[in-house]
Amino acid sequence: MNDARRFFFGLLAGSVLAASLYAAAIWFALGIPVPSTLVPWGFIKSKVEMAAAVSSPKILFVGGSSVDNGINAKHAGEVTGLPAVNMGFWAGLGPEYILDKVRQVAKPGDLVVLIMEYGQFNWSGECRYWVGEEMLPLVLCRDPQFFLSRPLEEQFHFAIRMSPAFLGECLQERVHPVTSVSPDGFFKSHDSCGDVTNNITANLSNPLPIGNTPKDPIWHLSHPLPADAKGFSVVADFIDWARKSAVTVVATYPNVARNPAYEKADSQVTVKRVKDFYRSMNVPLLGSFEASEFSPECFFDTHYHLQADSAVRRTELLIPLLAPYLPGQSKQ
């Protein structure tokens, strides 16, 4: 066998081996309820089921933890007379996964209020898919339908990012399954509308990591957002789906702790690009960036998480802006 043929067969064998290893890795993880995913999956599942049980037309407030800790859907429902659900998860799940959950529960006539954190519009690396370490175990272990619905290219990116520690946990669960208990922690910290109920300073026991306190600037806001940010196409796909599904979409800025860094040019670039994106999609962007800023003293822990009374105030400021887009209202 000459060198060229030896190289070819070696390359082919290596490719087959690599593909087999990736397939085996996915098999180890797919649908295996590892204990570490129990509570976060209970959180996601509870919010989706809560929204699915609410009749339409309804209001869905959508985003990461800035929504979970920054909007009071119960108050919005009381004022508007429409059922409202807080579908704030956490930003580490990524925009594609969060919006997939919204697709499952949004019905014709509903109003979706997008309040996407700045970090959800772009992420590090060259990969155009969000495959964060917080999202990966949940999708593979608890939500295999989402994984299997993704293009093969995206599934490949999921597979190659599984850590040895995670695969070891999956293997251990396959060999020695652990009896799971109900993740009732969600119901102790959230109400029937999905709003956080324990976001008061008296409940804050652990010191915050440096860089995430209310007085620290948000990295993705204090740095310029690229014009071709990867998250724009993900949000655009959702908006297109909503229009075809007779679901109204509006957007607003996420609540943030006021910081001098946001007065600088880099932050202004980011805010403008978010504004330009929604304008290009013909989606109303309600309010102003300045109105989304609150004093650091209004925050529970991080620079996105408002205390309970401030979340009500934030909601009260938003409700009049939503009025023209509520079901049955004129948008002129």
Image (tube, rainbow, N blue to C red):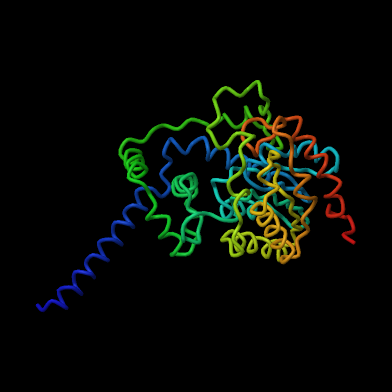
The residue under the point 36% across, 46% down is: 163
The residue under the point 57% across, 36% down is: 212
Q: Residue furthest left?
A: 1
Along the horizontal axis of the image, is 259 left or right of 330? left
Quarter placement of the C terminus: bottom right
Q: Position of residue 148 (x, y in %)?
A: 47, 58
The residue under the point 76% across, 43% down is: 84
Q: Which quarter of the figure has residue 103?
A: bottom right
- The residue closer to the viewer here, 229 or 237, is 229
For the image, the number of numbered tags is 0
> On screen, 291 above or below 157?
above
Along the horizontal axis of the image, is 85 left or right of 9? right
Quarter placement of the N terminus: bottom left
Along the horizontal axis of the image, is 10 left or right of 185? left
Q: Position of residue 309 (x, y in %)?
A: 76, 30
Q: Position of residue 226 (x, y in %)?
A: 59, 61
- The residue closer to the viewer here, 147 or 206, is 206
Along the horizontal axis of the image, is 8 left or right of 19? left
Q: Position of residue 308 (x, y in %)?
A: 72, 30
- The residue closer to the viewer here, 123 or 73, is 123
